[in-house]
Image (cartoon, rainbow, N blue to C red):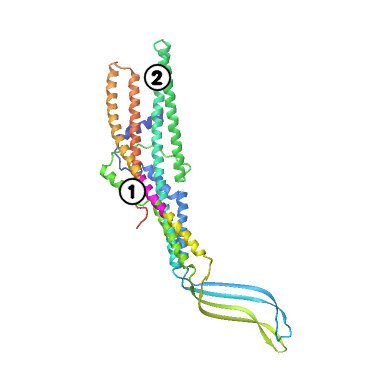
Amino acid sequence: MRPLRSILLSLIIAACTCNAAGLLPEDNFPALRELLDQFEANSPVLRNEAGRIEEGRAGLEAANRIRRPRVNSFYRIQGQYETRFNSEADNINNFDFGPFASVNLSLPLFLWGEVEARKDAAEGRIESATAWTAHRAMQLRQELRRNFVEYQLAMYAAAVAEEGMEYARRKEEAIRAMLDKGQTARQNLYEAQLFAQERQEEYDDAMARAGNCLDNMREICAMPRLMPGVAPFPGLGPLPVELLERICSEAVSSPSGEELSLRGELETEQAFWRELQARNKPKIEAVASTNLDYVDEYRVGGNYENVTRVYSWLGIQANWTIYDSGMVKTEQRASTARQRRLEARMDEARLRRAKEASSIAREARLNMSRMQTRATRLDMLEASVKLMEAQLADNLIPANDLFQRKLDLERTRLELVRAEAAYMLAIAALEEMAKPLLEK
């Protein structure tokens, strides 16, 4: 027996005798827990989402700074040619060249709620980005769990198929020997060869599925050289029905990350609508300014000459848009439409969460039933194998019949492991959905 097959089959056999530490996959596979830690630390998806949160925080800081003083200035050098009519000066045409400069200080005093609206919009963006980041992390954790478990199952399936290939090889050798002696028909040889081809196809399919799962894990964890080992699959017992129903109920009632993200977008849009409402109202500011320019000064002889002037002023200033051709009202109408769309999407996300939780719970119940029936079938097959071993010892049955029954036993054991894996993943998904994504 080849090393891979012997190791993996021993793991499958051990699976039905070990006790599970918990129902989450990482509770039973320490290697998976390490991968989840690596994912949290290295995932480029999470780093990208974290950038959205940082962007929202920067927007909140910018909104908080609106009430702070602002200083702006300008400086220019210009040449100016002018002609004066009805002037007492002898030279009515004049060309001046000189500087213009200004330094202005302004402090917003009253902005009709615009600052609060911008802060609310920034907080909505932060909430949306945070919720979506948590949602994506939850999705990727579950995807990593699924691929890890399916990788283990694929390797187990490959081991079972490899065992079948070994059996087919020995059976074909025995039939060829009997055929050479004229003790059997060629049809039996064809059947053995067909059996070998089927097991080869099963092996290739299992290895291909294992490769796909491995590629997915490498992408999720950002670890191109990841190569997880094959671990014993724990034997699991089903949860009490009452506990399963409670987890399912919590999963349905807990808002999804998608819904929370949309709620943040809705709050942002509502704040933007309030900002539009304040846009055309008078903005009151305290202002101070210092300016440098030049002015004409009358001199003896009938000439005007430009002289440098520096002047300063301080005051209260109000400015507003009197007429904007209806732009603000049009933007408010568009914002209202976007709010209605977001509310509809939230309702859709809520219904989708309920459907998803119900579907996963149904899958958990189905696999709970499969675990029970397959465990019963496994016990019956084990008893049958023991009986056939005794019959073989008394030369009552051929060895091939016993070997075929042992293969049936291994396939049933693998089917039980598949049901346990699907049940464990379903419970993990429900528990993820039941957890609050955001801290209160």
Q: Earlier in the sequence, mark 2 or mark 1?
A: 2
Residue 241 location in percent, x, y? 26, 42
Depth order, front residue of 434/382: 434
Q: Distance between the residues labelled 2 and 1?
A: 54 Å
Dominant secondary structure (helix, strand or loop) of the stretch shown in magenta: helix
Residue highlighted by disc 2: 171
Residue 107 location in percent, x, y? 49, 74
Q: Crowding at label 1, few (<14), some or many (≥20) Cα neighbours within 10 Å?
A: many
Q: Which amino acid does label 2 sit on?
A: Lys
Depth order, front residue of 159/295: 295
Q: Residue at x 71, y 89 (%)?
A: 300
Count of labels in the image: 2
Depth order, front residue of 185/126: 126
Q: Residue lying furthest front in this view?
A: 325
Q: Which amino acid does label 1 sit on?
A: Val
Q: Residue lying furthest top in this view?
A: 182
Residue 108 location in percent, x, y? 48, 73
- Residue 27 appears in the figure: no
Residue 422, disc: none
Q: Does the magenta stretch include residue 265?
A: no
Residue 180, image quadrant: top left
Secondary structure, mark 2, is: helix
Residue 122, image quadrant: bottom left
Residue 252, disc: 1
- Residue 416 appears in the figure: yes
Q: What stretch is highlighted in magenta?
A: 343-356
